[in-house]
Amino acid sequence: MRRLLLAAVLLMTACEAPAATPSPTAEPVVFWDADTPQVRGPSAFTPLPPERQASRVLRINAYQLSTTLPTAPPTLNVYMAGGYPDADKARVSRFNEPGWDFVPFFSLVQFDRAGNVVPGGAPPLGPVLQAPTETAALARAEAVLRPRGLLPADTQLTRVVRQRDGWRITFARRIDGRITYTNKGAIAYVDANGQVFQVLIRRRPLREQSAYPTRTAQEAWTLAQAGRWLTFNLEDGAPLTPGTVDRFMVKSVDIVYVEGEVLTERDPIRPYYVFRDMNDQTIYVSAIANDGP
């Protein structure tokens, strides 16, 4: 009887255990280089190049502001992002496990169990969970990413989205304390068994910085109403399908950084006002004075 009780306790413990994954090494891995940008003089990158990021298709017929506007500081930093040398391709060998790949030029690390990275695929990460919940899926994603050094201290959770076969969990970096919306930011896919089956993370190192004078939120809102806004393909929660909005009713306005697709070896990461409507559609106006589409 005692053995039966012990077995029952062990079974309950296994089913209710938190979605943790043991670290692949004894000590947490430091994967990304620390950001140590060279501080340049004011407006050192002037003229800023026009934004060339891919945009979402969005049409707006009318605008309405249903929130207060933020107050921008007199200056904000613009950063120049770089990449990693080709010799760093083997950086994922620090994990000592199959399925990982790193593309230095794009500062892009990825894991895939389906065989897209490693022929034959790799096993998903973490043991199977019984009837995992959203909380357990998030815990599993963090338990996989943090010990491997893929979620530095300046990273925060942004969204957990339920999908047909599991969850899509996204994280965002913060630059100067402001959230950074990125094309291919930090994404972990957790399946219905509570295992991580795909990871996609881009994090470019910041090489230089320069302070620029800002435009006010009211100036940005005036430009937005005149149609002088941008859309981006970013992990910002906006719908990806083309859309037409009869009335763009703004529910929030924030100052964020945008880290888009890698276009060259040296691309700017600049601050934007992001206007978000009731349906999570987003439009962007540069927070830098005299900078615009």
Image: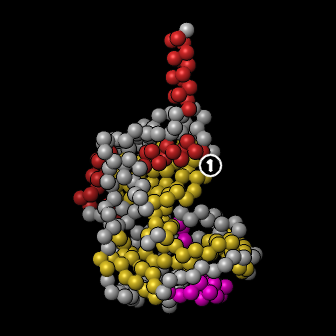
**In the image, is residue 111 above or below residue 159?**
above
Q: Is residue 221 magenta?
A: yes
Q: In which quarter of the image is residue 69?
A: bottom right
Q: Is residue 262 magenta?
A: no
**Extreme residue in the left direction:** 87
* Residue type pointed to by label 1: Arg
| Residue 2 screen position, x and y as percent | 52, 11
User: Where's the N terminus, which quadrant?
Assistant: top right
> Residue at (38%, 47%) from the top-left corner?
147
Q: In which quarter of the image is residue 33?
A: bottom left
Q: Determine if residue 248 is in view.
A: no
> Where are the magenta residues, as a range?
214-234
| Residue 44 screen position, x and y as percent | 35, 87
The residue labelled by disc 1 is: 162
**Extreme residue in the bottom direction:** 290
What is the basis of the colouring in this image? secondary structure
> Residue at (45%, 77%) from the top-left corner?
270
Of residues 180 and 76, which is closer to you in this image? 76
Q: Determine if residue 235 is in view.
A: yes
